[in-house]
Image (tube, rainbow, N blue to C red):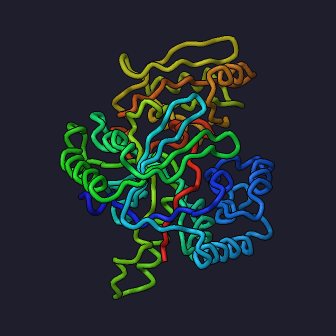
Amino acid sequence: MNKNIFQPADILLPKNADMEKWAVIACDQFTSDQAYWDRVRAKAGDSPSTIHLILPEAELGSAGEAEHIAQINRTMRDYLEQGVFTEYPGCYVYVERTLENGSIRQGLIGKIDLEAYDYNPGSVSGIRATEKTVPERIPPRQRVRRDAPIELPHVLLLCDDHEKKLIEPVAAKKDSMRKLYDFDLMENGGHIRGWLVADEDAAAFDAALTEYCEHVGEKYEGLPGVPMVFAVGDGNHSLATAKSCWEEIKAGHPGVDVSELPARYALVELENIHDAAQVFEPIHRVIVNTEPEKLLAALQEYCAPEGYEVQWYSGDKSGTITLDPARSELAVGVLQGFLDKYLKENPGEIDYIHDDDALIALAKQDKAIGFLLPAMEKSSLFRGVIRDGALPRKTFSMGHSREKRYYLEGRKIR
């Protein structure tokens, strides 16, 4: 399975560029803050920068979107023709990202085979989405990728490597590797360093991954279905777009062997869910303009004597409910399943809140009730996806906005 799921790639990095101007945060961040993107453009100016190669979601649907996309594709071609990039063939890049709290998150850049990834409900592929894909979010991204000559990833892929046999051994050898970059990220994004992983170091990782894939099913004994190797932790809609574009290419070439085309693959950063720097924060639920007592009464059907304990708040009242673990591997799966059904038949609007105090304050409103969800045990993510399929929207948050992946490495897809 290893050769079909995560591989070395021909990786593009800029040469002789101001790296702080080059690297820009994922396009799906700061969607309501156009001023953020205005500052990024002002900082980059006319220098080589990924801001000239992406379309921030804050600007989707603008009057000049079509021309903007065409300009992005022209700039990509210009960068290739003008020698802006150095290409590192058949390699990985080991990455260390220093976060706001000073912790260091480790990752490995490589490419995945899109044939091993399926974001659709009921997927049994080796790589699966962690949350339900919203089909309407794919076409705007397809318009950007469809004619692009290169890709720039912000996808974070996760492995459930308790024993730390994949990425951590690479990290241990970094002092013997060639350092590719070392700089501060703009807009308080922290610091990032990267090393070239090639030749025998890449081969050693490939061997470790092959062994990991052969035994991954042993982690999930007792769960039905095919074992999952990797989960998409962030950037699922970006990866779903790459998959959709690949399916378009195949459909547009009936009877033609397109299996060797570079568009079959997508560049991602692989991270270990058990990295100490990986913080999975729960996302709480508050329902407003509802009848709290009626909602709580209806929720009893989803409770059990033993299970997931969840605190609720409504006005000056509070309490604890115990959700039935037979309904899902995760407390949020049980609660969201109930809320989706209840709110179809009863008044109320749901919102998703990160901060505990903010949730409690919002629940003090008239006709409001809030549920404070427990933190998710990391391996529960994999078990939940294997058992229940893609998890409910807003199941968890991987760090803060400024800790999301920045565009840095690239790869030719044409």
**Nearer to us in this view, 18 or 409:** 18
**Nearer to us in this view, 201 or 97:** 201
In which image quadrant can residue 257 be found? bottom left
Q: Is residue 321 above or below residue 137?
A: above
Instruction: Give coordinates of residue 92: x percent, y percent.
Output: 39, 56
Left or right: 179 as drawn, with respect to 23:
left
**Nearer to us in this view, 163 or 85:** 85
Instruction: Give coordinates of residue 236: x percent, y percent.
Output: 50, 53
Instruction: Give coordinates of residue 363: x percent, y percent.
Output: 68, 22
In which image quadrant can residue 372 be found? top right
Left or right: 106 as drawn, with respect to 33:
left
- Res 122 seen here: no
Instruction: Give coordinates of residue 286: x percent, y percent.
Output: 63, 29
**Nearer to us in this view, 285 or 20:** 20
Q: Residue furthest bottom?
A: 255
Q: Is residue 80 above or below residue 134?
A: below
- Res 8 seen here: yes
Q: Quadrant of the N terminus?
A: bottom left
- The residue lying at 60 percent from left, 36 percent from top is 400
In which image quadrant can residue 125 be found? bottom left
- The residue lying at 67 percent from left, 35 percent from top is 348
- The residue lying at 64 percent from left, 53 percent from top is 24
Circle count: 0
